[in-house]
Amino acid sequence: MSLREALRRGYKQIIYLCLFIAIAVPLVNPIGLPVPIDKTTLGVYNKLESLKPGDVAVIGNTIGAAIYAEVYPQYVAVLEHLFRKEGVKIILVDHGTEAPIFTQRALNEINAYNRKKYGEDFVHLGYIAGGEAAIAGLCRDIHGLLKVDYFGNQLTDLPMMKNIVDARNYSVVLTFTASADSQFWLNQAYAPYGTPVAFGLTAVKVPDAYAYYTAGQIFGIIESLKGAAQYEVLIKRPGMAAKGMDAQSLAHLLYIGLLLLCNITYFVGGRKRS
């Protein structure tokens, strides 16, 4: 059977095979297609790059299976960037029940425990229930809200936590989510204390966040898998997001090519019949 006949009959097996190849190849062997950098992503990078020894970065997340593909690569890229910053203190907070699993996975992925000293350079507080009320407590009096970290260590026994009391001690807050808790940090950290806030979001939440960005209330947005790939490029560490964008781009190009090929075949065949 000729290619024209196969296309005319619309053999979906051919399309699925081509799609599988287009997706699988860049995932196994990344192509490195150009990734333009959005100003929203660059804003996050520049802010974190400006952090100095002694500054405190609070990183919250609600990462779970439902948003893993879009948000987890952002989270890993930002943690990698922060762990390169000498003397910057990092507080990790989980706002979703699945989040602690992915926080620990990300820390292991970037070899965090061999790069910085736990309790002196970074702390994982674990899951904190309560939504906005919990975030308000973190901003008002972290020691009043929590007594132990994710591992059961007393916060008062962790050297870096002794001088961290409330949001006035936070240099920057980033939250990775697909839920309303991103706005909770605006309400509780930025509005009362002026703490700089940025978001890492799924694609569907980005339009809502642009209102805060254009108003100057957040300093940046990492947008879905695209933003994660951009951040990987900025830190010169291509990873799962860059591979994913290569695969998406090739899949889109494949469908464009198939549309063109099918239309050309249709019109050429139509002229011959007439």
Image (tube, rainbow, N blue to C red):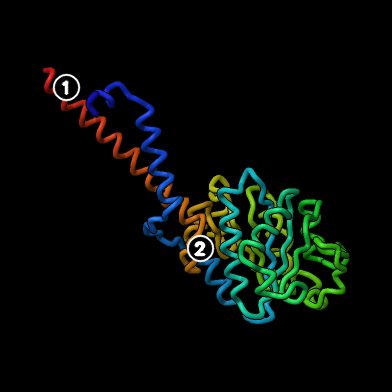
Residue 208 visible in the current orientation: no
Occupied quadrant, residue 146: bottom right
* Circle 1: residue type: Gly
**Most foreground residue, 80 or 56:** 80
Q: Is 227 on the left or on the right of 83, as rendered?
A: left
Who comes first in sequence, dot 2 or dot 1? 2
Q: Is 42 on the left or on the right of 61, as rendered?
A: left
Neighbourhood count class around disc 2 (C-alpha, 10 Å): few under 14, some 14–19, many 20 upward: many
The percent coordinates of residue 142 (x first, y second) are: 82, 66
* Circle 2: residue type: Tyr
At x 66% / y 80%, what residue is drawn? Answer: 87
Circle 2 is placed at which residue position? 231
Identify the disc placed on residue 171: none
Compared with residue 221, is residue 267 higher up or lower down, i.e. above or below?
above
The percent coordinates of residue 50 (x first, y second) are: 57, 77
Residue 272 visible in the current orientation: yes
Q: Distance between the residues labelled 2 and 1?
A: 49 Å
At x 75% / y 68%, what residue is drawn? Answer: 123
Circle 1 is placed at which residue position? 270
The percent coordinates of residue 260 (x first, y second) are: 26, 36
Instruction: Identify the image quadrant of the C terminus.
Output: top left
Neighbourhood count class around disc 1 (C-alpha, 10 Å): few under 14, some 14–19, many 20 upward: few
The percent coordinates of residue 74 (x first, y second) are: 57, 58
At x 77% / y 58%, what residue is drawn? Answer: 126
